[in-house]
Each structure stands twice: as C-alpha cells, then as structure tokens.
Amino acid sequence: MTRQRELILQILRQSDRHLTADEIFFLAKLKLPSIAMATVYNNLNAMSEAGVIGRVHTDGGADCFERTTEKHDHLLCDGCGRLTNVRFPGLEAQLRETLGQEIESYDLTVHCLCRECRSRR
Ligand SMILES: [Zn+2]
Ligand SMILES: [Zn+2]
C-alpha cells in the first residue's frame, strides 16, 4: 500500500463522519503537503470499488466517503446537510415480501431536520 493510500485510509478510519473528497484532501495535506488532489481521487475511487471503504452518492452534492462498508441507510438533514448512518433491520425482508421477488439492492435516504436545525427555526 502506498503512503498516500495509507494516509487516506487512516483519515477515514479516524472519522465517524462522511467526508467529501475535498475534506479528505484538506486533511491529507496537513500530514503530507505534497499530496495531489488527483491522487486522493484515484485512491478513493480504487478503494471504494474494491469495497475497502464506503461511498455515498448524494443528490446534487459531492459523493461522500466513509469507513463503514456494511449495508446501511442514511438520514440527511436538509438544513445543514449532515448525513447520519441508520439501520432498518427488517426493511430488506419487507421489500422482498411486498414486491414478491428478490431484490438486488436498494438505496434509501431519509430526509429530516436535525435537532439543532429544528431549534434554529
Ligand atoms: Zn441539521
Ligand atoms: Zn453512511
């Protein structure tokens, strides 16, 4: 593993948030000032394709990366854009049952207003 890849992986493992490529680039640059944006992108692409890290597509926004690769769903705050991992244990079985067939995958983002955003209104 290259030093750059190790650093990017370390950044993701130390964070419990979803990070955009830009945020990862910023954090990586603090440790390794010579690192290039393209290197960060290439490593993120390669690692998410290999299933080492998770990748989240957000509507309109930039893709986010995270250390968890386990299947989970997302709660998105429409106020501040905060993305939280959530699990709905029986959901996949329920989808299969309702549809009466096997499913390949599903993508679920629940939109909400987090407590802080709600109190600001
Ligand atoms: Zn919020
Ligand atoms: Zn997630």
Image (cartoon, rainbow, N blue to C red):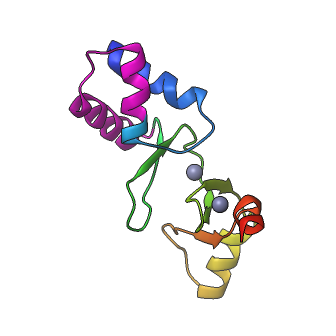
Is residue 82 in sight in this rendering?
A: yes
Image coordinates for residue 75, horizontal then vertical, percent: 64, 63
Placement of the C terminus among the 4 image quadrants: bottom right
**Residue in the foreground of this view, choosing between 95 and 81:** 81
Q: Is residue 95 above or below residue 98?
A: above
Using residue 117 as the reference point, say whether residue 99 is left or right of it.
left
The location of residue 6, given as percent across then percent down, is 41, 18
Q: Is residue 1 visible from the viewing direction of this image?
A: no
Classify residue 121 as left or right of residue 47: right
Question: What secondary structure characterizes most of the magenta part?
Answer: helix
Span highlighted in magenta in the image: 24-51
Query: Which of the 4 quarters of the picture holds residue 5?
Result: top left
The residue shown at (65%, 86%) is 98
Residue toward you, 48 or 119? 119
Quadrant in the picture for the N terminus? top left
Residue 16 position, x and y percent, is 63, 37
Does the magenta segment cover residue 33? yes
84 vs 42, left or right, is: right
Residue 55, horizontal then vertical, whole percent: 44, 49
Q: Residue at x 62, y 72 (%)?
A: 111
Looking at the rendering, which quadrant does residue 58 occupy?
bottom left
Residue at image position (30%, 31%) is 40
Q: Is residue 58 above or below residue 16?
A: below
Closest to the observer, 101 or 70: 70
